[in-house]
Amino acid sequence: MRNRLSQVAWVLAIALAMSQMAVADEHVHATVPLTAPSIKIDINPEARVSATLSGALPPPVLCGTPAVLSVKIVNRGFVTAALEAEFVGQFEGALLDFHPQPLKGVPNELRTLRITLMKPGPVDLTIAFKAHNEIPDLGGRDRIHFLMGCLPDVRA
């Protein structure tokens, strides 16, 4: 009887430890680090580009001031062409500044993208990325879509 109780206690202790590890593991993976890039670009060996939002967008800035978004580039194709970005559609009062040097061909790079909004209020933005002289993705995987806004300048 004593041996059976010790076996049950041992099984319960293992089950409890495993459940606590699972909860801790979920907690760690559920949070996004504050330093995570806002955008992740994945370039496959055929130089096809896919883009996703991977981190938090920057907080709203004053209208007319650029908001800086960090961009992580995972270059699986060792591409050395320039990476281009442009708005999809017409956006009155929104400017996109993304003029990186050609990619270095290394597996991971960090770049910045600046968006300047001129009018307060939310703006629905879509940005498409592609490698220079490559065909854009027909399935839309090269695009990110998000809402962004700026704060009115009350100093005037």
Image: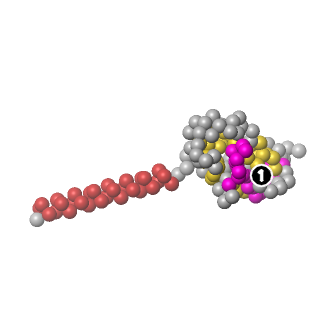
Residue 145: name its quadrant.
Answer: bottom right
**Residue drawn at (85%, 51%) of the image:** 93
The residue that mark 1 highlights is 87
**Residue drawn at (22%, 57%) of the image:** 10
Q: Is residue 131 magenta?
A: yes
Quarter of the figure that contains the C terminus: top right
Quarter of the figure that contains the N terminus: bottom left
Among all residues in the image, which is located at the extreme bottom? Answer: 1
State which region is magenta: 117-137
Q: Is residue 77 left or right of residue 82?
A: left
Q: How is the image coloured?
A: secondary structure
Please state which amino acid type lies under the numbered disc 1.
Answer: Phe
Q: Nearer the viewer, residue 25 or 41?
A: 41
**Residue 9: percent from left, percent from top:** 21, 60
Q: Is residue 120 above or below residue 2?
A: above
**Residue drawn at (53%, 51%) of the image:** 31
Q: Is residue 20 magenta?
A: no
**Residue drawn at (42%, 53%) of the image:** 24
**Residue 131: percent from left, percent from top:** 69, 45
Q: How many marks?
A: 1
**Residue 70: percent from left, percent from top:** 66, 42
Does the image show residue 56?
no
Q: Nearer the viewer, residue 27 or 133?
A: 133
Does the image show residue 116?
yes
Q: Nearer the viewer, residue 151 or 128?
A: 128
- Rate crowding at label 1 as few (under 14), some (14 to 19) or many (20 or more) other CA atoms within 10 Å: some
**Residue 81: percent from left, percent from top:** 68, 39
Residue 123: name its quadrant.
Answer: bottom right
Q: Is residue 100 left or right of residue 2?
A: right
SS of the residue at dot 1? strand
